[in-house]
Amino acid sequence: MGVKLIHIPKAHDVRGSLAVIEGDCIPFEIKRVYYLFDVPSDAYRGGHAHKEQQSLILALSGSFEVIVNDGKKSERIMLNKPHIGLYIPTGVWREIENFSSGAVCLVLASTEYNESEYIRDYDMFVSSKQS
Ligand code: TYD
């Protein structure tokens, strides 16, 4: 379905780690950055696909699980490292759940926010994949 884990290059020494996203490290130009924090452990986030947007999702702190679904198969991926992001191409349904305490979910997006490019109805998503 085109979903893949991307390892962000990092510099590590006794002072800690520094990860850098630049150039062609991720397969799109970043137009927007947003993040989820103070998320209750029983919260369910996401629950949509996009007609245009590509995303990279990173667990900057803590952990959570991302369920991705291309209308045919679904996969559950745990993110718990700040330098390993999940790339999600256009047209993939995603849900995010099981947030640990203090988790911060960073999303790098290829588009500015535009509600009209969201697909928030799962049945519509599935039928868009069948046509
Ligand atoms: P929502 O899409 O429900 O978050 P998620 O699906 O990632 O869990 O967004 C929550 C609210 O924030 C909703 O009212 C739309 C708004 N929002 C913006 O205004 N700009 C943005 O870039 C995003 C992602 C959401």
Image (spheres, helix red, strand yellow):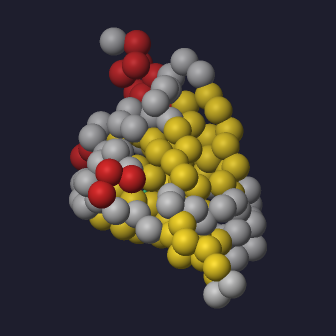
Q: Residue at x 54, y 52 (%)?
A: 7
Quadrant housing the C terminus: top left
Instruction: Name the residue nearer the viewer: 91 or 55.
Output: 55
Residue 58 sits in quarter: bottom right
Instruction: Name the residue nearer the viewer: 76 or 4.
Output: 4
Question: In the rendered image of this protein, does residue 16 appear above or below residue 49?
Answer: below
Q: Is residue 60 left or right of residue 89?
A: right
Q: Is residue 49 visible?
A: yes
Q: Is residue 115 left or right of residue 93?
A: left
Q: Is residue 114 left or right of residue 18?
A: left
Among all residues in the image, which is located at the extreme top? 131
Q: Is residue 115 visible?
A: no
Question: In the rendered image of this protein, does residue 75 appear above or below residue 52?
Answer: above
Among all residues in the image, which is located at the extreme bottom? 15
Residue 57 placed where, x, y %?
Answer: 50, 55
Residue 5 placed where, x, y %?
Answer: 56, 44
Question: In the rendered image of this protein, does residue 108 appear above or below residue 60?
Answer: above
Among all residues in the image, which is located at the extreme front? 13
Q: Residue at x 67, y 43 (%)?
A: 77
Residue 129 placed where, x, y %?
Answer: 40, 19
Instruction: Name the residue nearer the viewer: 49 or 20.
Output: 20
Q: Residue at x 70, y 69 (%)?
A: 62
Residue 113 sits in quarter: bottom left
Q: Residue at x 50, y 35 (%)?
A: 3
